[in-house]
Amino acid sequence: MALRLDDKFVKPFITDEEISAIAPEIEAAAASLRAKTGKGAEMLGWLDLPENYDKEEFARIKAAAEKIKKTCDVFIVIGIGGSYLGSRAVIEFLRSPRYNLLKKDTPDIYFSGCNISGSDLDELLAICEGRDVCINVISKSGTTTEPAVAFRYFRAWLENKYGKEGAKERIFVTTDKARGTLKSFSTDAGYETFVVPDDVGGRFSVLSAVGLLPIAVSGINLDELMSGAADAMTALSAGDVYTNDAYKYAALRNILYRKGKVTEILVGYEPYEQMFCEWWKQLYGESEGKDGKGLYPSSVIFSTDLHSLGQYVQSGLRTIFETVLSVETPDSEAKVPNDPANIDGLNFLSGMPMAEVNRTAMNGTLLAHVDGEVPNIVLRLAERSARALGYMIYFFELACAVSGYVLDVNPFDQPGVEAYKKNMFALLGKPGYEEMTAELRARL
Amino acid sequence: MALRLDDKFVKPFITDEEISAIAPEIEAAAASLRAKTGKGAEMLGWLDLPENYDKEEFARIKAAAEKIKKTCDVFIVIGIGGSYLGSRAVIEFLRSPRYNLLKKDTPDIYFSGCNISGSDLDELLAICEGRDVCINVISKSGTTTEPAVAFRYFRAWLENKYGKEGAKERIFVTTDKARGTLKSFSTDAGYETFVVPDDVGGRFSVLSAVGLLPIAVSGINLDELMSGAADAMTALSAGDVYTNDAYKYAALRNILYRKGKVTEILVGYEPYEQMFCEWWKQLYGESEGKDGKGLYPSSVIFSTDLHSLGQYVQSGLRTIFETVLSVETPDSEAKVPNDPANIDGLNFLSGMPMAEVNRTAMNGTLLAHVDGEVPNIVLRLAERSARALGYMIYFFELACAVSGYVLDVNPFDQPGVEAYKKNMFALLGKPGYEEMTAELRARL
């Protein structure tokens, strides 16, 4: 199994009775998920996506990635929320958080259209100067403000540099399969298009074309990633709170939530896990944070943040718990060098693999935080590989759905995201919002 | 004033009586801070640092930065916690979060020694290959594991490339002024050294040599930064909860904390603010997270994270409040391009400055979140400049100290950070920790 839940460091904080009490709720949640009778059941396409995906499109994604790798130095991915977090998380996890700074035979990859910052756009355009560029715009509707504005910029930039004909070979569009002006415009313009599936929400879409095209451009093996997810789909397809780790994770975090642990901190020990934590924060925060309920998702990278948030975790307000991602197989052979001068007094570590020091820091921290009354759920990932990561992605998606059902929310909608958009459009004077405008302006 | 607190969007959630009730507590906290009679009073060097700093060392920092700029392509800053967060925050805020990817006439700057990741070290060493390197190791004691191990690596790398004599011109050490083996070794080896002041804790040290040398290497004007902090020192030296915005911020967050808002989310609207948020998280989390108390510090960058955590903030568990950083003067002239095809239906925005769209997103979000029962404190920063940032740094430091006193903790210690270190050393078999080793191993 690529991922295993270790409950040793959460056990001191929960009772067997609490687990057996929540077991039927988990069972009911899983049953309604499998039977597609629960809330948001029309958005369950991710559940069998690792096997039931469009094979023809999958081959086109690989071919497009090869073409992109050959024809550009810089690949701009334009999308916001689930349209960029998944691919960015996977690329940084498997390649590097410093991917663009490494020597490599794949293009630099930049993410745009995920903010409204003018200086961010100015910078990206300067970076593109004199380099060959391809873009992938990812937007279900084509009308989301942030990616739409970025697409206006980069389409104009490409057409200016390569002409309309040249640009059309460099623009790849991931959008609705049929509806929307972005789809029809793309068809007319001759852009290659890929599909944002109707039954897969943004935060569950990393294993669809949404995530896969950028991931493939970075040189990651898509087959391995999908195989890992398929492994998880099989391994986690049955069982109960005692035998299915996704169900167990859903159970433990709901038990802790009910006991007043309102914040869950996802903990990594490698810098490459940071964007994965961001992906996880969207997955859980957006799925569960509704109806006045839900764990607040936060994240840290240790030992880095032991020197910033470590004090709080050890001794602050006791309303937190941690979920620790432990990558079990080292991916570096770096060892602590010997220093004859022993300036730092650390020669007892000389020759020890860094991975062992890091693992020991984790073990020391687990014990310290348990002593500080912070429950710790440990997720042990076999290795840093596409296959293991695919497994973990599916694990978290499944656990999230079950967890949301136990919380009695619809884990697949996000009505709260519309609130700021409506206000923004009204304040910007968008046609159709006139009635709200004056009232909102008066409140500023 | 470079920074102004706007309480319009927090007012619906607190009463005038609550402010007048906490006013005497704030007054007492500020008085004991000024009189140096409160907890941790031996660590108040930061309070008058913007004026009372070592002018001779300040000049040496500038000279060293000029030398570093001339002699290297890559500058490695080795430090953890307060030894790197401040400089990284300032560099990204004023230059760019993509600083290393921009064309520029200053060296690339990488941060090392802030984790125990072998792959992170491997990567950095590969990046240095064939390039000229200088390093700045920052460690009060010289014995903290993470930076010590990185220093072993990079010292060996430099001595291998340039010889001992050549390397000594490329190693800059920021450490205790007299104690510790790092100081004595550096003196013997002929490294230029700078001082981690005795009365300034790591998280308050960005305006000392700790932060200033890397900041200067990035090309930022140190005089402007210090002037801004001195402006704040003067502007915020007196007054009360009604007239002093640092005191007001301390009051508002304590009132909200007492009303069950246990998580404070620092909100930025520009990607360049992200590391500043991380600096803030250490400042507040490590100062207040003790004795089973303290607000949990979290952060987001909007509108990016409106599409990930926005749903939670709008409609999740109501135990959060936001503190919003608004940069008032645009630093980009980028405008929304017109699109004759109007694919996205956004032509009503054509020609509008991105800064205005971003500001409107913020205003729309403020109203939406207030409607969602989330109190919002707004901090209005005049501009993206060294002077304004210096002001804001001092503002947050002062407010943190006062806030910690009102919470009745020592805002200047961090005893909880030792817990994991002790366990780690015992598990690693460090001499002197033998008694703990067996007991801890048995618990794993």
Image (cartoon, coloured by chain):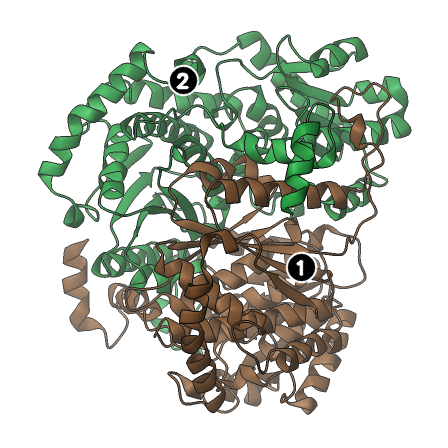
Chain colours: A brown, B green
Q: Is residue B397 above or below residue A136?
A: above
Amino acid at the residue labelled 2: Gly
- Identify the element where label 1 is drawn: helix
- In the depicted view, which residue is nearer to us: B362 or B421? B421
Chain letter belonging to callout 1: A
Q: Is residue A263 above or below residue B346?
A: above
Report the residue at 26% width, 54% height from top: B374
- In the depicted view, which residue is nearer to us: A118 or A64? A64
Report the residue at 81% width, 18% height from top: B168
**To which residue does mark 1 refer?**
A93
Residue A73 screen position, x and y as percent: 73, 62
Q: Is residue B421 visible?
A: yes
Dots 1 and 2: beta carbons under 8 Å?
Answer: no
- Identify the element where label 2 is drawn: loop
Q: Is residue A290 above or below residue A366?
A: below
Residue B233 screen position, x and y as percent: 35, 19
The label on residue B40 is 2
